[in-house]
Image (cartoon, rainbow, N blue to C red):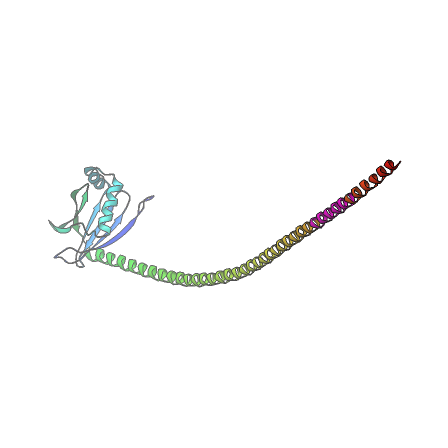
Amino acid sequence: METGSTTRHTCLKLEIPSTEPLFVKGTWFDIHFDLSVTDGLRAWVCKATEEEVKERAAQWDQPVTEYIELAERYLGFQQPSSVYQFVDAGDDYKRLSWTFEKEGTKLEWRWKFQLSPDSRKITAGILDFLMDANIGLSEEVVRKTQSFKKLKVEAEKCLEQSERFTNEKMEFESEIYAKFLGVLNSKKAKLREFRDQLSKQEIAGKASMDEEESTDKTESYHSGSGAEESEEESAKSLTSSSKDVPAGRGRGQKRATRK
């Protein structure tokens, strides 16, 4: 491992039509990478040096980091849209190639592999990596499963608590509504009682006013009758007086004549 660099490992089970499955192991650095391929019996290796990677990246007008990232993507996971080949290149060499599309154009990258002098060691190293990765994945699955179970228990608790809160909320709202309805009905009853009292007071006041008006009319009528009687009595008195006055005067005239 280089100082200050990031190292990543991948292992791809590459399935190519009409051939046995291959295992492609990659060790990826910042500016170069190593590849090894095995079919279970023989193994081939490829060491892409810094100079070779720079040259290939320049040919494709790509930065080195982008070139390595793209190679890692296609050799770390088999891409369904890509066509992979692992063919003879003469003198126990093999050529690994894969295709990809860029801006609507189908392109192909190829790297040459040399037969390993110790195929058993390379194959054992790939198998060890796969076993370690499988163990790591199994442990990760166990951790995820335990975490999922814990989350499920917590979710059930939260659901139960939510249902309890919902029920308590409904009971509280029902109780508050019942109390509010009672207060509202009480207020309505008091308002009706107050309205009835006002109506009774208005009726009583109207009856009292009618009675007072009737009394005033009666008194006015009696006062008018009394005045008429007084006028009649005055008229009668005047009539009597006028009758008496002429008779006296006649007698006086007669007496004067006699003299």
Indicate yes or no whether the magenta region holds residue 206: no
186 on left or right of 148:
right
Residue at the far front in the pictured view: 258
Q: Who's the residue at 81% across and 42% down the image?
A: 247
The C terminus is located in which quarter?
top right
Magenta region: which residues? 220-238
x and y, in percent, of residue 258 in the image = 87, 37
Would you identify the image quadrant in which residue 192 lies? bottom right
Residue at the far left in the pictured view: 90
Above or below 67: residue 10: below
> Which of the two residues, 67 or 38, is positioned nearer the viewer here?
67
> Which of the two residues, 65 or 210, is positioned nearer the viewer here?
210
> Which of the two residues, 181 or 103, is positioned nearer the viewer here?
181
57 on left or right of 209:
left
How many marks on residues?
A: 0
x and y, in percent, of residue 113 in the image = 17, 49
Prevailing secondary structure of the magenta residues: helix
88 on left or right of 247:
left
x and y, in percent, of residue 9 in the image = 28, 51
x and y, in percent, of residue 196 in the image = 60, 57
Q: Who's the residue at 18% across and 44% down the image?
A: 101
Q: Who's the residue at 24% across and 46% down the image?
A: 33
